[in-house]
């Protein structure tokens, strides 16, 4: 199975900050990497697919980068509605696996 | 609009089985595969498997092999996930999610683009 490791597990940031979350795969997954946002009590919501493509309707302050084993999700200017947990997910092979999540909290 | 509507909360005894439904609407049911993902309280997301609503073929995570069965009913555009021999560790929210996809430079990329609201299963 491909292991996905996110860092950090949590972070505190202020509105307006630039935030970057990292995700590392245990083997190469090319660009088969997706990012999701989840708020408490809600289902996950797709932000980025294929490593760097913004899902329709997602604000442009979100961006994704990387390939092979190292990926990043960046929020250019954190907004109040962005405080949530973020997950990366590989769709390269089954079983599809998720990172453990990164909780973004208000400083 | 495109949506997946899941069945309600369930409380089950250890050793019992649970069957969760996920009804699709707003798109052609047989075109898009459906994933099942679960989330234990306070924990991350765990992929359980996927079903092709067209032919009914499935791929299950090895962890759930022998205990999970995913089926579909094309007449009602509904997929089902049944988990047997329940134990307390199966207490979780179970989500269905549509497999969206796109072809870029001749390569298929897949993602989970539409999610149900989740079905809470409590084993106690």
Image (cartoon, rainbow, N blue to C red):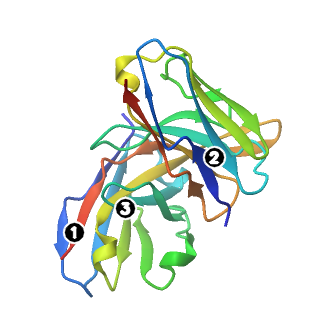
Q: Nearer the viewer, residue B25 or B95?
A: B95
Could you give the CA–CA distance between mark 2 and mark 1, rounded to whole angstroms? 31 Å
Question: On the rendered structure, is B78 left or right of A73?
Answer: left
> Residue tagged by mark 2?
B110
Q: Nearer the viewer, residue B111 or B75?
A: B111
The residue shown at (39%, 34%) is A84
Q: Disc 3 or 2, which lies upstream in sequence?
A: 3
Q: Which quadrant holds residue B3?
A: top left
Eye-nearest disc, 3 or 2 = 2
The kind of secondary structure element at disc 2 is strand
> Residue tagged by mark 1?
B122
- Residue B90 image point, x, y percent: 33, 72
Badge 2 vs badge 1, beta-carbon distance below 8 Å: no
Write down the chain letter for disc 1: B
> Residue tagged by mark 3?
B75
Q: Residues within 10 Å of mark 2 (few under 14, many from 20)?
A: many
The residue shown at (35%, 19%) is A80
């Amino acid at each position: 199975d491909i292991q996905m490791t996110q860092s950090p597990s949590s972070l505190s940031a202020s509105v307006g900050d630039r935030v970057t979350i990292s995700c590392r795969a245990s083997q190469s997954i090319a660009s088969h990497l997706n990012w999701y946002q989840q708020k408490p009590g809600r289902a996950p919501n797709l932000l980025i697919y294929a490593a760097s493509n913004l899902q329709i309707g997602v604000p442009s302050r979100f961006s994704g980068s990387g390939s092979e084993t190292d990926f990043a999700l960046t929020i250019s200017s954190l907004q109040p509605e962005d405080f949530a947990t973020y997950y990366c997910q590989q769709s390269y092979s089954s079983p599809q696996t998720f990172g453990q999540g990164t909780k973004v909290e208000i400083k | 609009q495109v949506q997946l509507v899941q069945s309600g909360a369930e409380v089950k005894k250890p050793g019992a089985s649970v069957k969760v439904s996920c009804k699709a609407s707003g798109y052609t049911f047989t075109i898009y595969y459906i994933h099942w993902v679960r989330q234990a309280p306070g924990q991350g997301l765990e992929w359980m498997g996927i079903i092709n609503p067209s032919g009914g073929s499935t791929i299950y995570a090895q962890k759930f092999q022998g205990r999970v069965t995913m089926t579909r009913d094309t007449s009602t555009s509904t997929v089902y996930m049944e988990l047997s021999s329940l134990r307390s560790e199966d207490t979780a929210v179970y989500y269905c999610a549509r497999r969206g996809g796109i072809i870029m430079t001749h390569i298929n990329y897949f993602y989970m683009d539409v999610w149900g609201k989740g079905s809470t299963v409590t084993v106690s």
